[in-house]
Amino acid sequence: MKIDVDLIRMQEKDIPMVLEWMEQEDILKYFGDPLEWIEEMNSNVNDSDWIWYFIAHTDEPIGFCQYYDTSKAPQGIWSNQEEPTAGIDFFIAYANLRGMGKGKDIIVELLDKIRVAQKFKYVIADVDDNNDASKIFIESCGFKQYKPGLWRVKL
């Protein structure tokens, strides 16, 4: 399978772009307050031992993704995992690029980065109960629902 998306470590200069993306109505409704995300990014983008941010690129930036150590992240549905687990979040910023396989490319690349880190046994994704398209998508990437709101894949 040819991967058409590269994941490049996010830098401080990328944060305003990510904020602009997160303020879009179709992303905002699933990701919540973008300023909370940006505050966390500002605190961790340059040096973190628990969260890693990436910008998805084709010929230009098209989206965002991150993975994090669930044992060190703020409390949430992803907390208290029984095995070393990475959580992921991602989106394609432009609606016209969705449904073209770019999301799957992002997940494949992100899972490869997590495998290379050799810190985690599982990867989880928390999917909004009202986002049926994301549920179908994450299952197509090999994740299985294992708890309400959480899908998991073994590395």
Image (tube, rainbow, N blue to C red):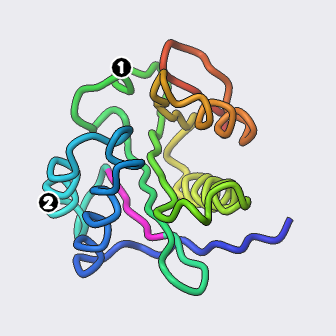
Q: How many marks?
A: 2
The residue drawn where x is 49% and y is 46% is 119
In the rendered image, residue 52 lying in the magenta stretch gets the answer: yes
Q: Which residue is mark 1?
A: 80
The kind of residue on which mark 1 rests is Asn
Q: Which residue is mark 2?
A: 43
The kind of residue on which mark 2 rests is Ser
SS for callout 1 = loop
In the rendered image, residue 30 lying in the magenta stretch gets the answer: no
In the image shown, does 23 or 73 lie closer to the viewer? 23
Decide: is 65 above or below 3.
above
* Residue 68 % position (x, y): 38, 46
The residue carrying pointer 1 sits among few (fewer than 14), some (14 to 19) or many (20 or more) residues within 10 Å by Cα, namely few
The residue drawn where x is 67% and y is 39% is 137
Q: Residue furthest top?
A: 148
* Nearer mark to the viewer, of 2 and 1: 2
Q: Over which residues does the magenta segment extend?
A: 51-55
* Residue 64 % position (x, y): 44, 62
Quarter containing the C terminus: top right
* Residue 154: numbered disc: none
The residue carrying pointer 2 sits among few (fewer than 14), some (14 to 19) or many (20 or more) residues within 10 Å by Cα, namely few
Image-based side of 51 in relation to 89, left or right: left
User: In which quadrant of the rendered view does residue 59 lie?
Assistant: bottom right
* Magenta stretch prevailing secondary structure: strand
Assess whether mark 1 and mark 2 are in contact (beta carbons under 8 angstroms).
Answer: no
